[in-house]
Image (cartoon, rainbow, N blue to C red):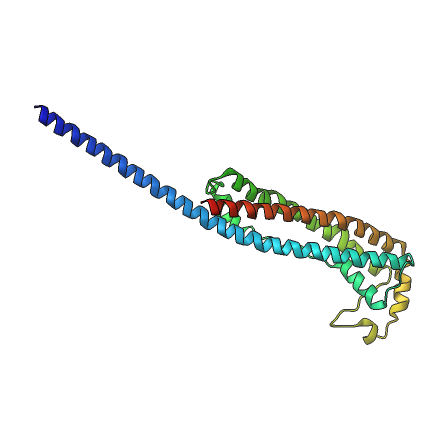
Amino acid sequence: MKNILARGGIEIIAVFLGITGGLWSEKQSEINKTLEREKTALVAIKESLIADSTAITGIIKSIDNEQINTNDFLKHLSKDTTLSLEALNGAVWDLMYFNYLPQDRSIYESQIQNAGKQIIQVDSVSKAIASVYDFIYKHLDKVFMMQYEVMSIPTQEAYISAGGYLDSKSFSITESLDFDQKKMFEKVLNNEQFISQVVMHYDINFFISEEYQRALRYVRRAIIYIDDYLIEA
């Protein structure tokens, strides 16, 4: 009788261990799949952020160059230096056209945001990524509108209203239509509305540069967080 009970007890324990082992194996399989999805998502996000980091760095350099040219333009207005007609034409081009970040949120939205951010196992990594896509990039949308609506378009309108025109690489109005570029610039550079817009444009651009520099810090921080986590994993 004791042997029967013993055997029965052993069988119950064996069944229990088998069920427990099966549940543990199934749970471990789910964990492994989650970690693999996490790694895939993080690698994709990292590659996208690296591309954005490169683009933002280029934007900052472009703004810096524009500020140098605009400063020279303002010095020309105040008679502190003399720019050639070609340099004046180039400086005005810089004022009207700008670089911005064409954001691609598709990877983040498809692999992380729509998954409720649960795919990322560590809060610090998840927050670093979310801070870029949910805060910084949305803020850069507003920065873009400021560049477009407050700087580029008003500067262009003020310049044209003052009687200005621009030569391009593909077509020179001065040469093709025999326009007097020197006379045109003398008129435009004495227009108070245009001068005021250039000064405002120049001042705002310092703020724009700072916003892109802040965005770059957030992007680089997210990349570092991802790198450190992937190395530890």
Looking at the image, the residue that sits furthest to the front is 232
Instruction: From the viewer's side, name the closer residue of 180 and 230.
Output: 230
| Total number of numbered discs in the rendering | 0
The residue closer to the viewer here, 37 or 200, is: 37
Q: Quadrant of residue 162?
A: bottom right
Q: Is residue 212 above or below residue 188?
A: above
Name above or below for residue 153 compared with residue 35.
Answer: below
User: Measured from the top left, where is residue 161 in percent x and y?
Assistant: 85, 59
Q: In screen coordinates, is 186 left or right of 222?
A: right
Q: Is residue 158 visible?
A: no
* Residue appearing at x 80%, y 66% in the figure: 166
Please give the name of the residue rendered at 59% of the width and 42% of the height, measured from the top-left corner: 131
Q: Given the current orientation, which residue lies at the most extreme top position?
A: 1
Q: Is residue 174 left or right of residue 34?
A: right
Q: Position of residue 34 (x, y in %)?
A: 41, 44
**Which residue sits at x=56%, y=47%?**
224
Q: Nearer the viewer, residue 135 or 210?
A: 210
Above or below residue 88? Residue 25 is: above
Residue 226 lies, in percent from the top left, at: 52, 46
User: Is any atom of residue 74 visible in this view?
Assistant: yes
| Quarter occupied by the N terminus | top left
Q: Where the C terminus falls, by quadrant?
A: top left
Q: Image quarter for residue 221?
A: top right
Q: Is residue 33 left or right of residue 138?
A: left
- Residue 163 image point, x, y percent: 86, 62
